[in-house]
Amino acid sequence: MEPGSTSPAVRVSGLTKSFSRGLRRTPVLALNAVDLEVATGEVFGLLGPNGAGKTTLLKILLGLVRPSAGQASLLGVPADSPRARARIGYLPENHRFPAFLTATQMLDIYGRLAGVDSASRRRRIPELLELVSMAKWADTRIRQFSKGMMQRVGIAQALMNDPEIVFLDEPTDGVDPVGRKDIRNIVVELRRQGKTIFLNSHLLSEIERVCTRVAIMNEGHVVRDGSVDALTQVESGYRITSTRVSDPARLGLVVPDAPNPDSSTFTYLAQNVGRDDLNGIVDQLRRDGVLIEAIEPVRQTLEDYFIEVVGREAKP
């Protein structure tokens, strides 16, 4: 960020983009007056079905496509400015690196393309390979890498210029569960370093685990924007895990599943209650000698919320 600047990491205002398609040059509106902000230091997830406008928005932020109207800025600098691009890193979806190069050689070439000086390249390459757990394959040719290894060195490539904003497009696509967990850990470490992470992914379970905030796009609009906790919490509901309650209906508790007779704890739902009502239920459970193990707000998964929102917003 510029000295003394309080600008967000990403700011989009009234962003509109239309394309012409077919022989008749029929106009297609990919983005329609999109407003969006991403604060510095956030792990932000951009979600949406195919054709929602995510890729177009990302290309505008990267300076690859010019908008038809509106503005986009990175760290207070116009997104199409070379100054903005010098401060970002990018891992594209389905990236390809020259297969005959080693990981070290590839990072050295991409570092030179990004304007990183030779001393910094010599220092950063081993550091980054260590960060992405690829140090032992530093001198292995890329043709021998699995998909997960390719994603790891791709992230290292995106970090060669020590960017302030890192754009990761489908970083865990095709990666096994162990590799996905490792990539999540890398994202957490980058956030700890103060970097802003902008994720574009269809794997909503991964987004839910690492993002501090998400936006859902549909048909060129941002239809929802907020923290994962705020978007997925079901109002006025709590899940109580405890020893057996003799008469749950007396307290307005619902048993969601058939209880396991061999279990020492049971799950009950307190639906449509606020905190005051919940505390009254807890007081009564204690008077009844019920031992409470856990109480948590009822939440839906981000995937369920996404499907609900996109289905509701879809036009006939």
Image: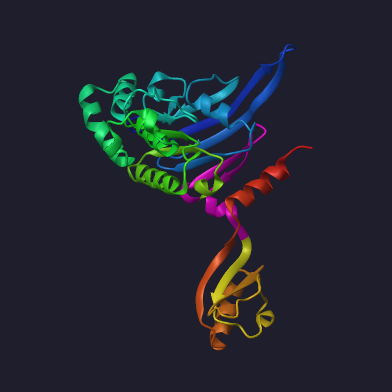
Q: Position of residue 174 (x, y in %)?
A: 50, 39
Judge whether residue 127 can be spotted in this image.
yes
Q: Residue furthest front?
A: 144
Q: How many marks?
A: 0
Point out the image quarter for the N terminus.
Answer: top left
Compared with 280, 195 (above or below) is: above
Q: Residue at x 28, y 40 (%)?
A: 130
Q: Which residues are magenta?
A: 209-234
Q: Residue at x 55, y 88 (%)?
A: 287
Point out the image quarter for the C terminus.
Answer: top right
Depth check, front residue: 298 or 12: 298
Q: Position of residue 180 (x, y in %)?
A: 45, 45
Whether the magenta-drawn stretch holds residue 220 is answered as yes
* Direction from residue 174 to residue 134 in the image, left or right: left
Q: Position of residue 67 (x, y in %)?
A: 57, 21
Q: Residue furthest bottom?
A: 288
Q: Residue furthest left?
A: 119
Judge whether residue 275 can be spotted in this image.
no
* Direction from residue 109 to residue 284 in the image, left or right: right
Compared with 204, 121 (above or below) is: above
Q: Position of residue 129 (x, y in %)?
A: 30, 36
